[in-house]
Image: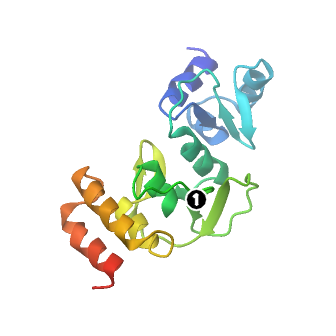
Amino acid sequence: MTYRAVLWDFALDNHGYVTTQDARELGVPRIELAKLAARSKLTNVSYGLYRFEDAPTSRFDQYHEAVLRVGPGAYLTRDAVLSLHELALVNPRRIRVGVPRRNRAAVPEWIEVVRERIPAADLTTYDRIASVTVARALIDCRELVMTERLLQALDEATRRGLVRRGDRSRVADALTGAG
């Protein structure tokens, strides 16, 4: 199997993206990424991040790219999580990406880096994209989104299995100030 084939197989499950760290873990030398980019087989998106342009696209690509651009330990947060799941009618101009410690990665204007410490229990992945849970995102959006929309989103998220029924009342109480 060629290095390109190894990277391609990985990228297909990761919205077309591969990082230098991924390549290292797959046993592909870093120089091979540069060679593939020079031959237009890969596009260098940002430092250490590449994308196969011929990989299938989806509406999740930009969210995944945002997290990868910020770097290891990054995750979607707040309204970006609601937007990912098409909840609460949010359409943020910038994708919010959380990090537990200061981050110096240069990111484009369409990404907003938020420094915050989130308990491990509130972190998950959706379609291979690191994220806070929908329950946590709903609570964290109290200042950003109208309460009515958040409560409707909570009902929808519970129906779709994105919020556990056991967490529903806790989240509803947090949204309405009852708890």
Q: Where is residue 26 in the image (x, y as percent from the top left)?
A: 56, 32
**Location of residue 52 with respect to 150 vertically, above or below:** above
The relative height of residue 135 versus residue 81 in the rendered view (above or below) is below
Image location (x, y in percent) of residue 172: 28, 73
Quick check: 89 above or below 150?
above
Quadrant where the N terminus is found in the figure: top right
Q: How many labels does the image show?
A: 1
Which image quarter: residue 124?
bottom left
Residue 145 against residue 74 in the figure, above or below: below
Determine whether, in the image, residue 52 is placed left or right of residue 36: left
> Residue 59: horizontal and vertical position, in percent?
51, 38
Question: What is the quadrant of residue 175 in the picture?
Answer: bottom left
Does residue 135 appear to the left or right of 107 in the view shown? Answer: left
The quarter in which the C terminus is drawn is bottom left
Q: Closer to the camera, 111 or 5?
A: 111
- The picture places residue 100, in percent across and down from the top left corner, at 57, 68
What is the three-letter code of the residue carrying label 1? Val
In the visual, does 99 lie left or right of 175? right
Residue drawn 56% across the image and 72% down it: 116
Residue 52 in view, yes or no: yes
Q: Residue 97 occupies which quadrant of the picture?
A: bottom right
Q: Callout 1: helix, strand or loop?
A: strand
Q: Which residue lies furthest to the right in this view?
A: 38
Q: Does any portion of residue 77 appear in the rendered image?
A: no
Closer to the camera in the image, 64 or 18:
64
- Residue at the far top: name it: 1
Residue at the location (50% across, 40% down)? 60
Label 1 sits on residue: 97
Q: Residue at x 43, y 65 (%)?
A: 137
Crowding at label 1, few (<14), some or many (≥20) Cα neighbours within 10 Å?
A: many
Closer-to-camera residue (104/146): 146
Q: Work out which residue is located at the far left of the displayed protein and give it.
A: 166
